[in-house]
Image (spheres, helix red, strand yellow):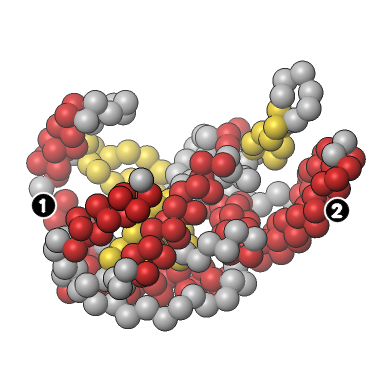
Amino acid sequence: MENAIIRCLLDKLRDDPVLSNNQQKNVSALIRIAGKFNINANIPKSRKIQVSEKLLVLESGHQPNFLPYAGTWKKAFFLNYLQKKLMENGMEAIAFFGFPDQNLSTAKYLFRNQVPALNKKGVKPIGFKINNSDRLKSFHTIEKPSADIWQHEMDNIEKFYSDISIKIPHKKNSSKKNLDQITEIMWNSYDLAKNFAELNGYVFAKICYEILNIDVLFFFYSDIHKEKIFIEESKKILQNVQLFNQIYNRVIIEKRLNIPPVNESHFPFWYHCECGGKINLFF
């Protein structure tokens, strides 16, 4: 079954149109941004990639949540898997994983989570709190926890997993080794990060690279914004806003998506305030 799926994918990709000159320019810029991410997160450089019209671009991503659930790690694993399979079959491929760090901070999983536990509820909450006044700010503008609060939560997490390992004697040594490695990554990420989004993104990327052997290129959406990579694409949307909204709403209906349609006067861009907030726009 696995080989059949890969063969089907390869057949479809071989017939896909090539990258335009502008797309190649965007990919090169994204590689540069991902390279800065690696430097800032203290991750070794990835293989050198030659951008051409034949390059296959894979992308996935997720909000930079605090120690996210297993499905998020599966995204990165599957990206890496597809990239390897394509290259094994003589095709040049590149895989990107993006963190939409400009989202509003309303989702609690950005800073809190829960892990399986041997108790009545079956889970234990972990993570942090942010001020209610910060909930409507972009996550990349939220400060990382203070050092003493971070230390306190790291101690709680370490104690939680240490207590579990005691109940599983034959796994005690390996559990401690894994816990020590993850704890080191988390502290290293804390020291490197300038805000909460960077902290979570670095932890995820470094665990992928150092523990799971996943070699994909990570980036923050806010860096794409700063570099104005998709400025030409944005201009095209601005010239056809109503058509864009009509297509957007039509796809929601056709695909039966569980997301609200937009008003025809909706402007498909956010206004980003220097205070960290952002608002919808209409014309």
Q: Residues within 10 Å of mark 2 (few under 14, many from 20)?
A: few
Residue at image position (25%, 59%) is 10
> In this rendering, would 251 be left or right of 95?
left
- Please rate how many residues cluster around mark 1, counting C-alpha atoms within 10 Å: few if below 14, some from 14 to 19, many from 20: few
- In which quadrant of the rendered view does residue 241 lie? top left
Is residue 198 shown left or right of residue 78? right
Cα distance between the residues tagged 2 and 1? 61 Å
Is residue 98 positioned above or below 216 on the image? above
Q: Which residue is mark 2?
A: 173
Q: Which labelled disc corresponds to residue 188?
A: none
Quadrant position of the C terminus in the picture: top left
The mark tally for this picture is: 2
- The picture places residue 232, in percent across and down from the top left corner, at 19, 63
Q: Is residue 121 left or right of residue 215?
A: right
Q: Secondary structure at mark 2?
A: helix
Question: In front: 235, or 63?
Answer: 63
Nearer the camera: disc 2 or disc 1: 2
Q: Position of residue 68 (x, y in %)?
A: 58, 43
For residue 239, the mark is 1
Q: Position of residue 152 (x, y in %)?
A: 83, 45
In this rendering, is residue 172 above or below 115? Answer: below
Residue drawn 52% across the image and 34% down it: 106
Q: What is the three-letter code of the residue carrying label 1?
A: Gln
Q: Specify whether 63 is left or right of 94.
A: right
Q: Quadrant of the N terminus?
A: top left
Question: What is the x, y in percent for residue 9?
Answer: 26, 54
